[in-house]
Amino acid sequence: MRKDVRILLVGEPKVGKTSLIMSLVSEEFPDVVPYRAEEITIPADVTPERVPTHIVDYSEAEQTDEQLFQEISKANVICIVYSVNNKKSIEKVTSHWIPLIIENTDKDSRVPLILVGNKSDLVEHSSMETILPIMNQYSEIETCVECSAKNLKNISELFYYAQKAVLHPTGPLYCPEKKD
Ligand code: GTP
Ligand code: MG
């Protein structure tokens, strides 16, 4: 059985990565957050799947590309966070983040991705129409979720999905194109 799960959050600046982590930990929305949250470890007995879980934040303001690449290669699952009220942050999911992650992960070890649409409190409509074609395009994406660090909506679900993606992946066990 797996020893632990390492969850990394990436995405454009200001989409709410740090707020999501702080909201999960303190169960309330923090008005002021640092650029980057300290790495936190959730003990096995308080996680849904009973496995110690590390949550790792990323901030362009405080980290180099090299540090980011290292964190990507250490992660067991990566949450790509965008803001549902920011089109640019959604575009960057496919133009920047997914290719960057694929480049920096070992081809043989499948790292599941989760698309996270934060700030759902700010919009009436859902971003799913935009997100579904991306889900269909990349088999690496395990699931997607819309949430709000502010309303605490779907926050614990998000981290549960991330844990589950590592412990019970639903993707293919091997890549058919590798057989020749
Ligand atoms: P960087 O560290 O710069 O990459 O940004 P970040 O992705 O960590 O975003 P951060 O958590 O610093 O949040 C950016 C801004 O968005 C802050 O003003 C937050 O208060 C706000 N914010 C974060 N989550 C939510 C949310 O769910 N709803 C609303 N309305 N605002 C949010
Ligand atoms: Mg941050």
Image (cartoon, rainbow, N blue to C red):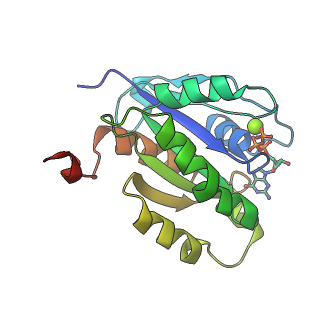
Residue 102 shows in this picture: yes
Outermost residue toward the front?
180
Relative to residue 91, is residue 42 depicted above or below?
Answer: above
Q: Which residue is drawn at 45% across and 38% down?
A: 77
Residue 86, percent across and down?
Answer: 76, 64
Quadrant that contains the N terminus: top left
Question: At 19% from the left edge and 52% from the top edge, which residue is drawn?
Answer: 176
Q: Where is residue 163 in the image (x, y as percent from the top left)?
A: 41, 39
Identify the residue at the far left of this view.
Answer: 180
Tell me the quarter of the picture where residue 47 sits.
Answer: top left
Residue 95 lies, in percent from the top left, at 62, 56
108 sits left or right of 29 in the view: left
Q: Nearer the viewer, residue 83 or 60?
A: 60
Residue 137, given in percent of the width and then of the height, sits at: 43, 65
Query: Which residue sits at x=36%, y=44%?
Result: 164
Taking 1 as reference, is 131 left or right?
Answer: right
In the picture as drawn, the residue positioned furthest to the right comes out as 32
Residue 67 figure quarter: top right
**In the displayed structure image, the side of residue 176 where residue 96 appears, left or right:** right
The answer to whether residue 153 shows anywhere in this view is no
Note whether 62 is above or below 172 in the view shown. above
Q: Is 103 rendered above or below residue 114?
A: above
Q: How many numbered circles does the render carry?
A: 0
